[in-house]
Image (spheres, grey):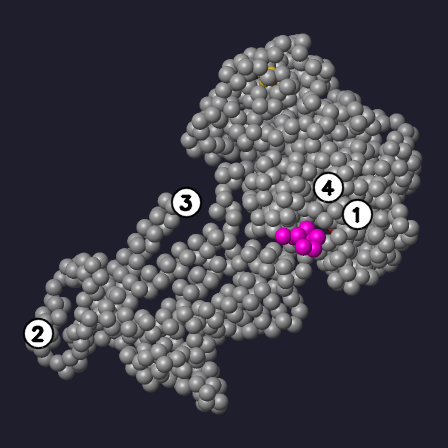
Amino acid sequence: MSDATIVSVNNLSVSYTSGGLKVDVLKDISLRLERGRTLGLVGESGSGKSTLASTFLGALRSGSFISKGTVEVAGQDVFALPAPALRQLRRNDVALVPQNAGSALTPTMRIMDQIAESLHTPGMDRAAKRARAEELLRLVRLPNPAQALGKYPHQFSGGQQQRIGIAMAVAANPALLVLDEPTTGLDVVTQAAILDVLADLQQTLNMSMVLVSHDLGVIDKMCTDIAVLREGRIVESGATRRVLAQPQHPYTQGLVYSVPRVDVPGIPPSMDTAAIDAGIQSTGEREVYVRTAPSGTPPVLQVRDLSIDYRRRPVPGTGPTVQGVSFDVNASEIVALVGESGSGKSTIANAIAGLQRTEAGTMVLAGGADLARTVSARPKGIRQAVQLIFQNADTSLNPRKTVHAAIARPLQLFGIKKTTVAQSLAEVDLPLGFAQRLPGQLSGGQRQRVGIARAIAAGPSLVLADEIVSALDVSVQSSILRLMDTMSRDKGIGFLFITHDLAVVRAVADRVVVLYLGRVVEEGTVEAIFSETSHPYTRLLLDSVIELGDDHDAKPRNVKDEIPAAPPEFGCPYASRCPLVRDVCRTKAPPAIRVSEGHQIMCHADASELSPSTLAHS
Amino acid sequence: MISLFAKRVGWSLVTVLLSTILVFTAIQSLPGDAATQILGQNATPEAVATLRSQLGLDEPAISRFFSWLGGAFTGDFGTSLLDGKSVGAEVGRALLNTSLLAAVTILVGITLSVVLGLLAGLFRDKWPDATISTLALVGMSVPEFVVATVLVLLFSIYIPIFPAVVVAGQDASLAELLPSIWLPAAALVCALSAYIIRMMRTSVIDVLDSDFVLTARLKGNSTSRLVFKHILPSAMLPTLNVIAMNIAWLIGGVVVVESIFNYPGIGTLMIRSVQTRDLPTILMITVLSALTYVLCNLLADLAAHLLNPRLRFPRSAK
Ligand SMILES: Nc1ncnc2c1ncn2[C@@H]1O[C@H](COP(=O)(O)OP(=O)(O)OP(=O)(O)O)[C@@H](O)[C@H]1O
Ligand code: SF4
Ligand SMILES: [Mg+2]
């Protein structure tokens, strides 16, 4: 191994034993990373990305072992190192930013102490360490670094915790930084900001990086090299741009084609596993399915001036969590509710589902049924008409009840005789044999199908789908989106589809409601929202999306990603971040600008100012 | 925060009051009273009646309770029905002796069980864990009087290093008591430790599984730093309540163990007072036990507050 090589993996196999059988997690992996370069590890959930990445730190999940091969980092065979030398390697040469920084920071230790632990320069006193820690926090652009040092992890937001995790990892100036899904679960704006920080750090500190991600856009932006994993094997590797632009292996092709794009409407094709197993090359065409929006269907839900307040008493200068929200969902229509985390998407869905009390406003179903009361006080008919599908199918299905029992329950509860469990399963394309399985025996996508089948079985007119594809691999995302499309058309169900992923919105939504700090800032058809004229906040969201094949260097950098903790009491919620802000924005609620039929933007600025060029974020 | 603690203190006082009422009624409903117990079976009804009126037992129960309560509030717990001595002084002396026993037990017991639980968790499924867990299981299933008897057999009969029973009476000095404290303390430690060890072990295992311990390990931290800085504080949190509960339960164990070893503490006094229906003494002991119980729980909450930054710095304080 030459000096220029930082990582070299040679014929590595990692296994664990289950019921006396040896199961391979990684099979015969070989790869090499030169100093100063960035390697992206991609693949579906369970493909072994994290396992491979953690071997660079000499770590394995308990129960796993190296059955073959070696891993060399900075010229040292990590799994042959005695414990003290391995500790030395971890202190000085490689560092990890774990998947979820929130749970990776020790809850009982102050930030200062956690960073100081990684500062090993001999003769450094407490004051020097403090100064260095502060500098590190400034490097990752954490607001108020000096103050932050004395705080505990839970006092920071997810994005801030991620920054602290990165600061902690680079504290010892490692030669290699390993990042496991560093931005998964963060919203687009925070993601863009954190990736900027990483790119800058790599420049200043001259590090090599390994980035694990299932997001091909992120890999495309950040990585010089890529390795695609499937079932523990590398199926394709090389220079990122080339591999992603002209994928050679059918699996890579499938992955690339199944990514939804903000600039291309339509649902991408799902991955054809059978064809991939057979080694059949794709035709090289990405055939998307473009949904046609229903026209003239009556509303199934009308929300008017909805306000929800979590505060026990009014706090001067701040307004309620959700205020003045109005929108319709029509029959057969898919309406997307988008916004950063904390913008109140789930709060609104919960209010419609009757899980959250409202302060003011009305919510009315088709036929005039009022949704003012919470779920326990709602008549059966209303409970049947409004169904909720959760973000996490894992936790919303009872692990000890079979699929059959899960779907039979709404049928029983609402006395539905027409539909059978078998029919419901068929509707979501699950084989009948699945009825007797337990949720633990299903994949993520299959579990989400069961969740949909259960909701649909009740025969609802409105389905609230809260981030139902966010946790799924792109390869199964499309098929769930297709299912939603079919259900809306065949059964006339209106969907309120909650997501923070704009590409998914573009793929499947008919209309979009953009939410910021619990206020609607823009509403319109999907084409209108993705058109040139946008609310400044929508523009920020659109500009922050990182897509495969973008010209990443041309994108705005270092945007302000700090959302205020609470909405302001008066004026426009976006005033504290808006590049077009004027005095009136802080005192008066913005009026609706009607850009076109069914497209309105809440803003004090002139419509002509709301174009990409004037809104370029500095 | 302050108001929360004020509320807790308020409830604690209510708990103490309720337990005195409960004990008063219970003793009241037992057959016989102090007069019959003092004079014995063959006393004439006239003698009993005279003693009763001397002791004030002929007044209605309610008024007796309230006059006791009034005294108790001013710190006067009345006089013993048995010998007319001040209850406060007598119980105070016994309390001092018991406190000595309890202090030794708690100090040794908690340290020992936290350390053992930590070791068992760190060496999960290896021999140290197997040994410690088995011992804890034994400690849990064997009642303290058996443990006490075995200890006496072992350490005062086979290998006579400790006295089997305490010969010194109520007024024994510290020097007289000390040698005889170890066997009762050991018996109590056994009863106290088992649950704490189990809880500590489970919570150490949970914490070891967490992302933050993995991260701390991958930062190249030494094992000792890992254990004391990253694992121990988080693992202690769920254990605190179990510790508090076990210390509170210790009160019951004390009665049994003291009477076995004839140790001149609250437990022995309690048994004697119940036998003689000496209500003022019983009530004062009740107040003390109840106070100990609520105090333990309050202290556990306070400790949790100190250990858990989430409680000290709520998110909104950002
Ligand atoms: N010790 C073990 N016992 C049982 N299963 C294991 C063990 N180690 C790894 N696996 C399995 O090996 C596979 C690879 O796991 P790994 O965490 O590396 O996947 P990943 O690509 O990072 O997935 P994700 O995208 O969900 O994070 C998974 O199916 C995992 O459940
Ligand atoms: S210009 Fe004013 S009203 Fe429009 S988004 Fe900016 S701050 Fe809000
Ligand atoms: Mg992973």
Q: Is mark 4 within 8 Å of ligand 3?
A: yes
Residues shaded magenta:
A117-125
Q: Residue at x 47, y 62 (%)?
A: B243
Cα distance, mark 1 to mark 3? 47 Å
Q: Nearer the viewer, mark 1 or mark 2?
A: 1
Q: CA distance from mark 4 to mark 2?
A: 87 Å
Discs 4 and 2 share one subunit? no
Residue A474: quadrant of the picture: top right
Q: Which residue is mark 3?
A: B1
N-term-proximal mark, 3 vs 2 = 3
Q: Is residue B26 left or right of residue A409?
A: left
Residue A181 is tagged as 4
3 and 2 marks on the same chain: yes
Q: Say above or below: A57 vs A469.
A: below
Kind of element beneath mark 1: loop
> Which residue was labeled with disc 1?
A175
- Residue designated by label 2: B50
Give the spatial CA distance, label 4 vs label 1.
19 Å
Location of residue A568 in the rendering, given as x and y in whole percent from the top left corner: 51, 24
The amino acid type of the residue labelled 2 equals: Thr
Residue B58 magenta-highlighted: no
Q: Amino acid at mark 3?
A: Met
Q: Is residue A121 magenta?
A: yes
- Measured in 3D between alpha carbons, the distance from the residue under mark 1 to the one under mark 2, in whole angstroms, is 95 Å
Q: Secondary structure at mark 2?
A: helix
Crowding around mark 4 (Cα neighbors within 10 Å: few <14, some 14 to 19, many 20+) is many
* Amino acid type indicated by mark 4: Glu
> In which quadrant of this rendering is ligand 2 seen?
top right
For image coordinates 36% across by 58% down, the residue present is B294
Res. A451 in view: no
